[in-house]
Amino acid sequence: MLADRDSLLRRLHELRSEHRDLDTVIARMEDSPVDQLQLQRLKKRKLKLKDEVAWLESRLVPDIIA
């Protein structure tokens, strides 16, 4: 279980890092004339990463029954 948690934390770190990188790339692309299709794909990838991060975070936080 501990190894599984460590792998989830590692994956979460990777996804957050990629999300930040995409944020930087998108911000730079929006400041200059670019291929709108490419920009749209990057934004879609960023949203997918956000969903994956949220899913992983929900897996790492234990359910608390009140």
Image (cartoon, rainbow, N blue to C red):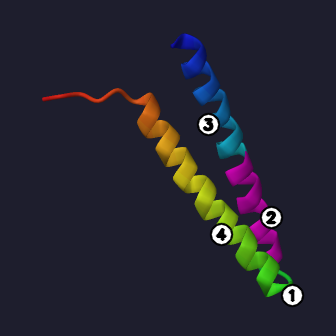
Q: Where is residue 2? Give x, y as percent.
A: 54, 12
State the extent of the magenta-drawn residues as a range.
18-29
Residue type, label 3: Leu
Q: Is residue 54 magenta?
A: no
Asked if residue 19 lies left or right of residue 36, the reply is left
Closer to the N terminus: mark 2 or mark 3? 3
Q: Residue at left 71%, top 61%?
A: 23
Give the Cα distance between marks 4 and 2: 13 Å
Q: Amino acid at mark 1?
A: Pro
Label 1: state its secondary structure.
loop
State the residue lying farthest toward the left.
66
Residue 25 image label: 2
Q: Is residue 6 above or below residue 32?
A: above
Would you call the spot at circle 4 few (<14 residues within 10 Å), some (14-19), or many (20 or more)? few
Circle 3: element type: helix
Q: Mark 4 and mark 3 in contact (Cβ < 8 Å)? A: no
Q: Residue 14 occupies which quadrant of the picture? A: top right
